[in-house]
Image (cartoon, rainbow, N blue to C red):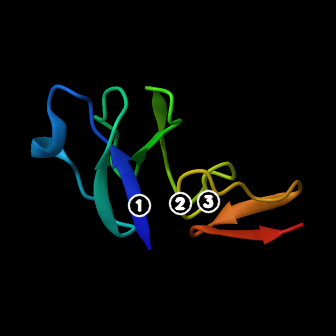
Amino acid sequence: GTVTVGTDGASGGATAGTSTTGASTAGTGGGTDCPNQQVWCSNGQGSGTCVNLQIDPENCGECGNACDPGESCLGGECKGG
């Protein structure tokens, strides 16, 4: 899959990072220095957050892909429920 990773306006495409979950494309947002195994998910309003797409139930497998209530995010897939 393709993960959209935001970059801050100042550094633009020059510092567009890659992630372990697929190709990354430059976006917009705040700072993008995320810890290992995390990627920047923009909220589309100039900010966002660093998330781990493998375990975050609000961003499971890709930014904005929320699991259903009662489900867990394991290995980038919603499970349980």
Contact, CB < 8 Å: mark 1 with mark 2?
A: yes
Say which residue appears at 50% left-offset and 36% top-offset: 44
Pointer 2: what residue?
A: 62
Say what amino acid the circle numbered 1 marks.
Val
Q: Is residue 40 above or below residue 37?
A: above
Say what amino acid the circle numbered 2 marks.
Glu
Horizontally, is 66 left or right of 49 in the view? right
- Residue 28 vs residue 17, the one in the foreground: 28
Pointer 3: what residue?
A: 60
Which callout, 1 or 2, points at the residue further toward the start of the chain? 1
Say what amino acid the circle numbered 3 marks.
Cys
Say which residue appears at 17% left-offset and 37% top-offset: 12
Q: Position of residue 7 (x, y in %)?
A: 27, 38
The Cα–Cα distance between marks 1 and 2, rounded to whole angstroms, is 6 Å
Q: Position of residue 53 (x, y in %)?
A: 52, 57
The Cα–Cα distance between marks 2 and 3, rounded to whole angstroms, is 5 Å
Horizontally, is 46 left or right of 78 in the view? left
The 10 Å Cα crowd at callout 1, few under 14, some 14 to 19, many 20 or more, is: many
Horizontally, is 76 left or right of 26 in the view? right
Q: Position of residue 23 (x, y in %)?
A: 30, 67
Contact, CB < 8 Å: mark 2 with mark 3?
A: yes
Say which residue appears at 37% left-offset and 31% top-offset: 29
Quadrant location of the C terminus in the rendered image: bottom right
Q: Is residue 62 above or below residue 16?
A: below
Q: Position of residue 35 (x, y in %)?
A: 34, 41
Pointer 1: what residue?
A: 3
Contact, CB < 8 Å: mark 3 with mark 1?
A: no
